[in-house]
Amino acid sequence: MAIDTQVAPTVATVAPEPRGVARRVRRATPAWRFLALYLVVLTVFGVAPALYGLYQAFIVTSAVGGPTFSLVQNFSDVIGDYRLPTASLHVLLYLLLWLPLELVIVFGLALAIDAKRTRFAALTRFVAYVPGAVTGSAAALLWLFMFSPAVSPIGPILSALTGKQTFLSDQSLPIVLAVMGISAGAGGWIVVLYGALTAIPKEIIESAVLDGASAWQIARLIKLPLIRGYIVFILVVSLAQGFQVFVEPTVLATGATGQISTTWSINQLAYSYATDQSNYGRAAALSILLLLVCVGLAVLILKKTNFYQVGER
Amino acid sequence: MRTSKAAIAIAIGAFLAVGTVGCAASSGGTPASDPKAPITVWVDAARLPQAQAYAKAHPDVTIKIDVISGAQNANTQKISLAKKAGTPLPDVVFLGSPDEIANLTANPLNFPLALNTVVPKKVIDSFPQGVLARCSYGGQVYCLGNDVGQTVLFYNKPLFDQWGYAVPKTFAEFEQLGAKLAAEHPGYNLGTVNGRYGVDAFFESSGCPILDTTSDTAVKINVSSSKCTRVGDVIGPMIKNGSLSTLDLFDKTYDQQVAQGKVVAMVGASWIGDFAFKPMTTNAGTSFDSTGKYAVAPMPTWSGESTNWSGSVGGGIWVVSRTTKNSKAAVAFAQDMTTSPTIAKAQTTYPAYGPSADIWLNAKATDPWYAADPSSVLKAAASKINPAEGYTRYVTQMLDSFNNTVIKNGATDMSSALTQWGQQTADAAKSAGYTVSK
């Protein structure tokens, strides 16, 4: 295989012993064979479209004349768009509501389940996990009914709360999405954190108890630091997910016609460029900006928390 | 590492390959007419039977029929992607969301064929002026109208008689009626102003320059014009006193109000009887049977106008591709879809083509759902669609902004809501590549 023969000399500089090289190549071959199919799929459906998107971001579609190439035009058009500040504010509000609340609920419930490992705890874990089975557009449809006063079982409460005939609006959407996000996402993370908590050696907890630590102290000073890595992981994954929020506001808008802007979130704005205006350049530019923000934040969080540091933290 | 270099090389290769395909999209040209070339037509599910019937009646032409979605911008996306991928474009397209024509005429699609050069003038002239004016840019007509949603005043005749209300002839009277209704019968309303129903029925009939296209890249927007402020003066107080609803016509909550007979009147499109009121009031469990209740009256007149202009909500159009290989067959198909008397009889909404409309109205005149024969009112309104508005590429943004300004804050501060609406719409128009003037 072409790739295998290319690997050999490179490795040779690291490990000069020829027999060792041969062994390494032999070891690497099945790995490459194993990866080959995935790499093809990754290239065709992942890398190539992403690179094409990057290329598109520099192609400007103008109202008159043919497409032109510009390094900055699409980016400056997108940043200057009158809808971007509003959409960014919407997403930011949603993240500020959803993330802290979800983390607190997930950690709190996982701790509670871990503290008393009874049959009730197992049931709680299961019950918390069930709403996670309904995700994405299906969840959006479900919540659409919950938040439409005319058909919702809690309709009278909603009407009383707002004093209006509709509850869904651009302004109430961060709350609605936070509720949806927690109900759909929390269960899965609770299971993950519970698993992490059970992996903490019994001896540590026992010695803490012997030293007279309270349950609260154990949770705060022992369990939390030990599973910090998992919480950081939840945070990074949720951040990326939250920044790209698209399906939920889109589906909710189809039910609450005329109440929710079609460009409520940043990703919807990118979609609008491509579908409303056939302006793929701007859509690509905004998507890249969004990617940069997500990657930037993830790197920041990982650095600040020493996520990849091996050994004692 | 050589491996990663190889991976990068492969990736770049793939990238370039995709890139070249992207650039290989075909460019427009003069319409070719090869009588043997097959044509592809895109129709929505509702128009599939008539297209199939046409294909059957014309065995000399090979017609491939694709069923497409009528959703907003669905066709723009499909054509845009086909063009990018270099796959063949359809020859004829039905647009259920006619605003899409503005996307199709512009860069990078440049799709439609100017029909005034290939369709006889007599046929073109038989469409109401306001219908084809919307898809005309620079003196070229790019569509044939399928149906039209001219606005009229629907009103509950028995209720008007019972409460002693007179049918408003002007919008000043309409506003007074709203105040009276709000005081005497709270909970009832005179229709809705949300989104396109509000913009099309009120601002468009008044000729408010918000979608006033002068070419496919230039538009006039001026919400401080009296043609806009006079609308604000009427709907502002009516939103405040609740006689106009701010819910969407098809919102579940509004649907219930229709089903309970709470809608006393509505300035609405010619199709709201058949497609909103009728289905909403014939569901099991509704307390109100609308049969024989609603009559249509001419549009009220705006202050300072001598004509009672109509707005237009929806209405499909037919578009022919300029890259068609068999323009003769494609144009003939589009023309038949809009002008055939057989299709006119089966049409569910008001046909745009004049002679077809007459055939359709003959049947509608005796529809027992209406409290009185609606035909003369509908026909008059179709010829009075205000030509001030055109199809644009920023209509979705304009409607979003309308709901966020005029609908949300209009009851408390209409004048600043209008200003904001105009500002955001101008921004949207610029973003969509239009030159904006007042």
Image: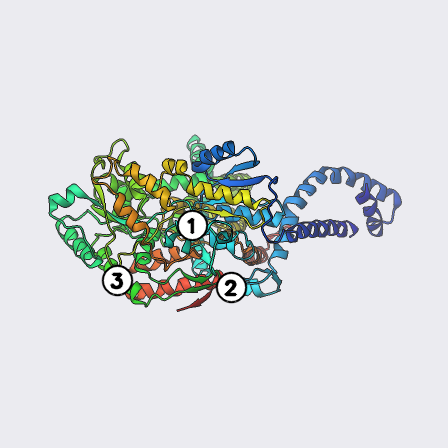
For the residue labelled by badge 2, is the local secondary structure a helix, a strand or a loop?
Answer: helix
Mark-to-mark CA distance, 1 and 3: 30 Å
Q: Where is residue A169 in the image (x, y as percent from the top left)?
A: 35, 51
Q: In this view, does B140 lie above or below B76?
A: below
Q: Which residue is drawn at 65% across and 53% down?
A: B23
Residue A131 visible in the current orientation = no
Q: Which residue is drawn at 30% across and 47% down?
A: B379
**According to the image, label 3 marks what residue?**
B305
Q: Where is residue A237 in the image (x, y as percent from the top left)?
A: 54, 48
Left or right: A181 as drawn, with respect to B168: right
Q: What residue type is labelled 2?
A: Ile
Tell whether label 3 touches label 1 (CB within 8 Å).
no
**According to the image, label 1 marks what residue?**
B122
On the same chain, marks 1 and 3? The answer is: yes
**According to the image, label 2 marks what residue?**
A79
- Foreground of the two, B263 or B31: B31
Count of labels shown? 3
Q: Where is residue A22 in the image (x, y as percent from the top left)?
A: 85, 41
Q: Which amino acid does label 3 sit on?
A: Glu
Which of the chains bears the disc numbered 3? B
The mark lying in front, picked from 1 and 2, is 1
Q: Which residue is drawn at 25% across and 58% down?
A: B235
Give the quadrant of the C terminus of chain B: bottom left
Q: Is residue A62 above or below residue B260?
A: below
Per the rendering, the mark at residue B351 is: none
